[in-house]
Image: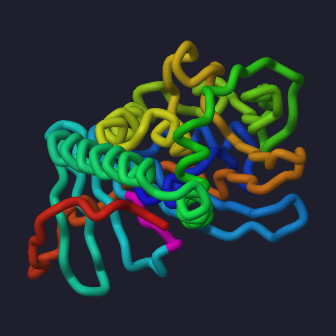
Amino acid sequence: MTTAGTRVLGAVLVCGVTAASSAARLAAADGILITVSEREAADKAPRTIARIQVEPHRARIEDSHQGDAEVVIFDGEKQVMRQINLKDKSYREVTKADLQQARAQVSDALAKMQEQLKNLPPEQRERIEAMMRGRAGNLAAAAAAAKPAYRKVGTDKVGPWTCDKYEGISNGRREDEVCTVAPGGLGVTPADFGVLTEFQNFMLNGLPPELARRIPLPTLGDPSVQGYPGVPVRRVEYDSAGRVTRVTELSGFTRQTFAEATFEVPAGFRKEAGFRGLGR
C-alpha cells in the first residue's frame, strides 16, 4: 500500500440498527459487506473511504480515495492479490514473493541513498534529508515508531454496541485509541474475519511491520500481536500535541450474498506485470 492508503480499511460501526436485528441479518448469508468511513478531525463530517466485501476465503476492497477506480481482490486460498484498475481496464497479480522482492528493492534503495548522503557536505545533506522527510515523513515516522502499548481506559458507545476503549501509548505519548467488541457482540464469529487477518499478514511481506500494523482492517488478531482483544469498532489517531487527526469507523456492516463475478477480474482486462502499491 502507498503510505496513507494503508488507512482505507476501517474499524466498525453499524448505523441505525439494534444488536439483535444486526445479528439476525448476519445469519442470513455467507458474505459480509463492510463500509468504512473516516473523518480527519473530530469536528469534520465523515466520508466513505472504502467498501469491503468478505467471504470465508476471499475479499474485495474498493478504495474510494482512488475515485472508485481501484479495486483489490485477495484470494486467501491461493494467497494472491489482484490489483484492478477500472479506469484503464488493467490488472496486476501479486504474490508473497512479489511483495518480498518489492520490499527488498525499497530497502536496498534507501540504504544506497543513505550511503550517498554521507558523502555530501553537512548543510546539503540536511536540506536533502529535510526534503525527504517532507515528502515521506508519514512513511518514515510510521516505520520508525515503536509499537504502542495498549491499556484499557474505560468503555464507550459505538453504534448499537458498548465497546471497550484501549489507549495506545508510544514514545511517551498517546498515539491512538481503539474501541473493541467481542465477535459475538457483532453477531459474527472469529472465522468471519479470518480472510482479512490473512490479508494483513500477506501485506507484511511488502511493508515494514509498523506500517502493516497500521492497516486498520476490522480483524480479530492475536491480542499479543495487535495489543488488545476483540474487533476494533473505532480507531482515533492523535498528533504529537494530542489533537485528533483521524477517526476511522465502520458505517455499514451487513450480511449479504455476492455474485461470483464480485471476486473476479472483469473480462477483457489486460494483465500487467509488477506491484504498484495500493490506495493513496
Q: Would you say residue 229 sits in the magenta stretch?
A: no
Above or below for 135 versus 29: below
The segment highlighted magenta reads: 61-65
> Which one is in front, 71 or 243?
243
The residue at the point 64 percent across, 24 percent down is 182
> Which one is in front, 192 or 175?
175
The residue at the point 48 percent across, 81 percent down is 67
Q: Is residue 218 visible?
A: no
Residue 202 placed where, x, y %? 31, 38
Corner quadrant of residue 90:
bottom left
Residue 81 placed where, x, y %? 24, 52
Count all numbered tags in the image, as a single digit.
0
Above or below for 147 versus 123: above
The residue at the point 68 percent across, 51 percent down is 249
Point out the image quarter for the N terminus: bottom left
Above or below for 129 versus 77: below
Residue 250 placed where, x, y %? 64, 52
In this rendering, position of residue 98 left or right of residue 27: left
Corner quadrant of residue 107:
top left
In this rendering, position of residue 37 left or right of residue 162: left
Q: Looking at this view, name the residue that lies furthest to the front.
A: 121
Q: How is the image coloured?
A: rainbow
Residue 116 placed where, x, y %? 37, 53
Q: Is residue 131 visible?
A: yes
In this rendering, position of residue 17 left or right of residue 280: right
Mostly what secondary structure, the magenta segment?
strand
